[in-house]
Image (spheres, grey):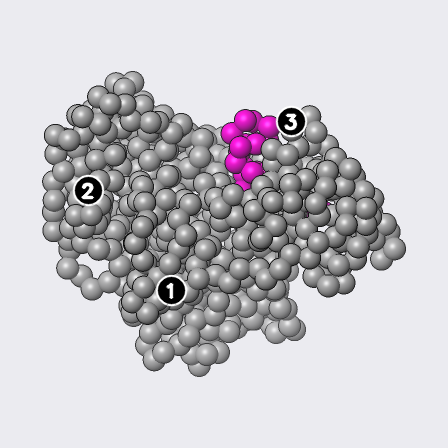
Amino acid sequence: MKILVAISNVPDTTTKIAFSDNDTKFSTQGVQFIINPYDEWYALVRALELKEAGKATAVTLFHVGLLDSEATIRKGLALGADDAVRVNAESPDSFFVAEQIAKYAKENAYDLILVGKETINYNGSSVGGMIGGLLDFPFVSLATKLDVNGNTATIEHDIDGGIQVVECATPLVISCSKGMAEQRIPNMRGIMAARTKPITVVEATTDAPLTNIKSFALTAGRTTCKYIDANNVEELVSLLHNEAKVI
Amino acid sequence: MSVLVYIEIAKGKVKKASLEATNYAAQIATQMGTSAIAIAFNADAAQTEEIGKAGAKKVLVVKGDQYKNNDAVYLSAAIEQAAKAEGAKVIITSFDVTGKSLAPRLSAKLKAGLVAGAVDYPIVNGNVLEVKKNVFSGKATAIYTINSDVKIISLMPNSFPVKLTDNKAEVADFAVDLNRITSKVVIKETKSTDTAGMIPLPEAELVVSAGRGLKGPENWGIIEDLAKAIGATTACSRPVADMHWRPHHEHVGQTGIAIRPNLYIAIGISGAIQHLAGVNGSKTIVVINTDKEAPFFKSADYGIIGDAFEIVPKLTEAIKKLKASN
């Protein structure tokens, strides 16, 4: 069983967001980049656990990005992935990323394609479903538990107001969410080994993107907080009812 | 040419998010000089009537057992066929659980550009749509241009209030050919996480949330009482979910779920950036915390500095008085 884990290179969660080039580009100045948490803590760690349990033979990282992503890819290799593939391109949208993953996964016969449920920078939640559509593979979203027995995956995933347990034959695509695994810290041995693990660089497909970002804007913060005295909670209720009109 | 909107029916009712999507589709249709057509699965007369009131000119009703589990494989096949039959150039879904599987699959099948999680009406620029969505977990927005011939937008729930008129939609049965379509996903078990009477968190308009300031899971009674008095759903911060004081589906934040309720009351939560990312789309934020330096106050509309154990029960009483007098 070969597992492909798609990882995104994202600004860390405490980053103060800024834009450049007339608000058309995300400013990377002073920004620390990490593997998208959903990709790392859930998709990648679970894949590694399945390998450690003898249920998977290989875990490959897949990333769409330029050379400056390499450090982030090495972090994933340090955690225990066997190798990585980087498509040398700056991605304009989710569909572009999905196309690259689908092409590689199909050409290299991966049984499981794991993605995080969304990226913390673009929040699209789209790549997994798009890969499923491109390859005509089943797609199970928001998975919180994953086990594999032979060619069958057993998955617990979130649905509206509930949890569903499903089974599906491989190959399939799964988007991974909280509950699937626990974050790991790479150890020294992993970090050293990562230095010599292969990162294969491939060229991107050349279709014109279906969507593009035209511009960015920072979300306006709330202006000021109106403080209410702790002894006067009726005042808060009155404000919520008459001013904010939310109750 | 038309705008096609996917309708979801849950527990016998048209989902509020689907009514919002219908309003949205109708508005876009007007901007483009066409009309909105809804596609609903196993819908009855009362449901199609409501879809009409939300602005659909026509409702296509598809019948079949395969659609009962909202499997995107079947929904997508049906919508692809309907889009072709109706010449739909824009397809609208909700950015909810089903929409997050359905819209991407449709995008791939139709090579249709998708903006997932739109928060505003698009700007129609000739053959191009410009659509705004949240990025960086709500810290910013981005305007995307959709360049493809067919375009898909999934609408963030609770972006606009639902408007119903006395519009009547034409209702037509739509036959779908599912001959070569089989989903390989087999459902073994379904468990509900809906806690007695509370609206599921992603759809809740009123939310009462608490964090480490509550000191222990045994103290959550005051939170649940407040939520019940308001008619709100309960939520929590990440540390509290990680410590298993509250179930993981209550965790709101950057690595939990993002919500956009009309009212978010945060009790004993300091307001770390990661938590804010999950809730800064709320219309009104109330913060109750003993620490006057808690960062959350900088993102609040209303704040009370004080002890939650004293304030929250008083707040519950005051809410009950308000409800009684109205």
> In the rendered image, which residue does mark 2 sit on?
A70
For the question of whether residue B262 can be seen, the reply is: no
Q: Nearer the viewer, residue B287 or B11?
A: B287
Label 3 residue SS: loop
Specify the amino acid type for callout 3.
Gly
Vertical relation: A196 (above or below) A113: above
> Crowding near pointer 2: few (<14 within 10 Å), some, many (20+)?
some
Which residue appears farthest toward the top when viewing the image?
A53
Tell me which segment is drawn in magenta: B231-252
Residue A151 at x, y percent in the picture: 27, 27
Magenta-drawn stretch contains A3: no
Q: Would you say A130 lies left or right of A73 here?
A: right
Q: Are labels 1 and 3 assigned to the same chain?
A: no
Along the line of sight, which residue is nearer the eye, A47 or B214?
Answer: B214
Q: Are marks 3 and 2 in contact (CB under 8 Å)?
A: no
Q: Position of residue A241 (x, y in %)?
A: 76, 59
Quarter of the image for the C terminus of chain A: give it.
Answer: bottom right
Q: Eyeballing the image, is A191 above or below B171? A: above
The span from disc 2 to disc 1 (Cα, nearest Å) is 26 Å
Q: Which residue is mark 3?
A: B216
Q: Residues within 10 Å of mark 1 (few under 14, many from 20)?
A: many
Letter of the chain that mark 1 sits on in the rendering:
A
Asked whether the residues under marks 2 and 1 belong to the same chain, the reply is: yes
Going from N to C along the chain, the mark reached first, 2 or 1, is: 2
Number of numbered markers? 3
The percent position of residue A125, horizontal first and vertical second, equals 39, 49
**Residue shown at the point (52%, 48%) measured from the top left:** B276
Give me the C-alpha separation between circle 3 and circle 2: 43 Å
What secondary structure is found at the residue carrying circle 2?
helix
Position of A82 with respect to B272 (left or right) is left
Indicate the quadrant containing the N terminus of chain A: top left, top right, bottom left or bottom right.
top left
Q: Callout 1: helix, strand or loop? A: strand
